[in-house]
Structure formats: C-alpha cells, structure tokens
Image: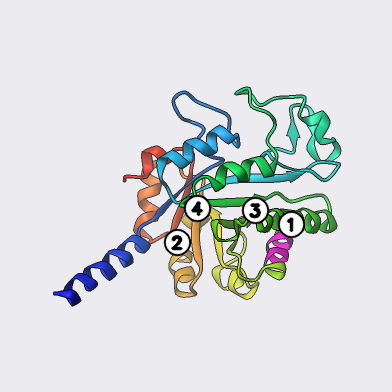
C-alpha cells in the first residue's frame, strides 16, 4: 500500500511538471477593475491567481536607479536620460508612484510560491547592459530572492552576462532567431519566443525539450493558440489573460 501511495505521489508530480504553466505578462492588469501594466497592483493581482509567475520589465535611470517600466519612455521622459527624481513626479495611470525595482521586489517577496520573471531591457551599449544586469542581480541577491527569480531578455549580451555572473540562474532568450541547438550552444536555459516563431518552426518545441531546454511563448491571448502550443508540449505561456487560461 505504501508503494502504491508513493507511486501516486510521483505520478502526480510528473503530471504537474508536464502541464503548461501560466505567467502573467507585466502582471495581471486586465483585472476588474483594470489597473496599469507593470504596476505593483498588477503584481498583487497576479499573486492572487496562484499561477506560476509574473513577468515585469527592468530599466535604469540616468542616475542609476533600477525601475520597472516596459517602454523606453515614462510619459514624455526617456528613462535612461532622466533622473529618478524627475521621473517620479509623474505617477502611473492608476495613481501609483513610478515603481522602483526594489519596491516591486518587496511585493513579490510577499508570495514566495510565485516566480518573478525578470526581463532586463536592452540598453544603448554593452557597458550599460552589463551595469543594469549587475545591479539587478545584486539587488535580487540582497533581498534573498535568488530561488524565486528567473530571467529573460531580448539582448543576447544580457542573457550571457547573467549566466557569467550567476551560472545557476535560469535564463531564457526572447528575440526568436536562435534555434534550440544554438540556444544550447550559447549556454542558456531556454527559449521564450513569440508564438508566431513556433508556428513558423513547428519542430522547435520538441527539439528544445529533447535538449533539456525551457520552452515559453509570449504573448498568448488567444485560447486557440494556447491549445495549439499545449498540444506541442510547451512548458510555459506568458499572457495578458492569465485568469482565463489558468484552468484550461
């Protein structure tokens, strides 16, 4: 009987790992009521869904402050050319303060069960990219969030710099032009590509899994595309509608 129960437990674990996991894109902002993407409220909303993770974007101000924002601009201000003091004068559309990475991570730490998917945005030079990468990792380590954090970037330089600094960190590449074999050769952990890339390369998910790579796809907001990717065995999808897809 003990062996039977143990077998069921192992099977349950295997099935859980085989299921496609859901990641909220820039938090869960299409909530009711709706909030602002990449806001601390959107992260809090994602935490309430009890999904795998929530993705957010990291940039650096002119004076070296790490902030959470997708676009290069906050209002009309270019983040990399503006001090944080100036940037914080403009609040988010939901009334929140312009979020620093530190404040965002504080909220993330409140729910250790949900992964923080850290997208470090490309910068103007490799030197700047290395600086933002180093500072981001330093902050995550200082806050003891190493085991809760995973990393993605459109910059191959940033991805490789993360692995150079912290080889154990999970790092996935976003840009979409590298095959699974090339991702493996670069020493990265996986591919996180727009779903159209997998549609054009239908063998890549299976090839990546054979190589032991993580597979993720963004931004999947169509349930039919989600089902298509699930059938191919994709590991994760990133979506603006995590509430709708989490139980499918």
Q: In the image, is residue 195 above or below residue 82?
A: below
Q: Give the mark nearest the N terminus, 3 or 1.
A: 1
Choose top left, top right, bottom left or bottom right for residue 99.
Answer: top right
Q: The magenta stretch spans which residues? A: 156-162
Secondary structure of the residue carrying tag 2 is: loop
Task: Identify the residue under disc 1.
Answer: 133
Secondary structure of the residue carrying tag 4 is: strand
Residue 49 is tagged as none
Closer to viewer: mark 4 or mark 3: 3
Task: Identify the residue under disc 4.
Answer: 217
Give me the C-alpha separation between circle 2 and circle 4. Answer: 13 Å
Secondary structure of the residue carrying tag 3 is: loop
Name the residue located 47 percent from the left edge and 23 percent from the top edge.
33
Closer to viewer: mark 4 or mark 1: 1
Q: Quadrant of the N terminus?
A: bottom left
* Local crowd size for mark 4, using a 10 Å CA cut-off: few (<14), some (14–19), many (≥20): many
Give me the C-alpha separation between circle 1 and circle 2. Answer: 32 Å
Give me the C-alpha separation between circle 3 and circle 1. Answer: 16 Å
Choose top left, top right, bottom left or bottom right for residue 69.
Answer: top right
């Amino acid at each position: 009987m003990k062996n039977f129960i143990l077998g069921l437990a192992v099977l349950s674990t295997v099935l859980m790992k085989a299921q496609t996991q859901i990641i909220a894109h820039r938090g869960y902002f299409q909530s009711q009521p709706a909030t602002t993407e990449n806001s601390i409220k959107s992260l809090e909303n994602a935490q309430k869904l009890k999904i795998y993770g929530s993705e957010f974007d990291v940039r650096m101000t002119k004076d070296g402050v790490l902030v959470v924002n997708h676009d290069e601009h906050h209002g009309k201000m270019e983040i990399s050319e503006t001090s944080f003091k100036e940037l914080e004068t403009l609040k988010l559309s939901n009334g929140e303060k312009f979020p620093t990475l530190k404040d965002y991570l504080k909220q993330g730490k409140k729910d250790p069960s949900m992964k923080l998917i850290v997208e470090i945005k490309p910068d103007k030079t490799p030197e700047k990219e290395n600086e933002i990468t180093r500072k981001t990792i330093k902050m995550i380590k200082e806050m003891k969030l190493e085991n809760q954090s995973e990393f993605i970037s459109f910059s191959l330089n940033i991805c490789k710099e993360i692995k150079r600094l912290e080889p154990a960190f999970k790092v996935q590449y976003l840009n979409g032009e590298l095959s699974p074999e090339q991702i493996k050769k670069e020493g990265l952990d996986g591919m996180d590509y727009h779903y159209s890339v997998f549609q054009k390369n239908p063998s890549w998910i299976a090839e990546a899994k054979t190589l032991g790579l993580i597979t993720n796809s963004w931004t999947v907001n169509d349930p039919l595309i989600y089902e298509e990717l699930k059938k191919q065995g994709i590991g994760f999808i990133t979506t603006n509608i995590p509430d709708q897809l989490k139980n499918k």
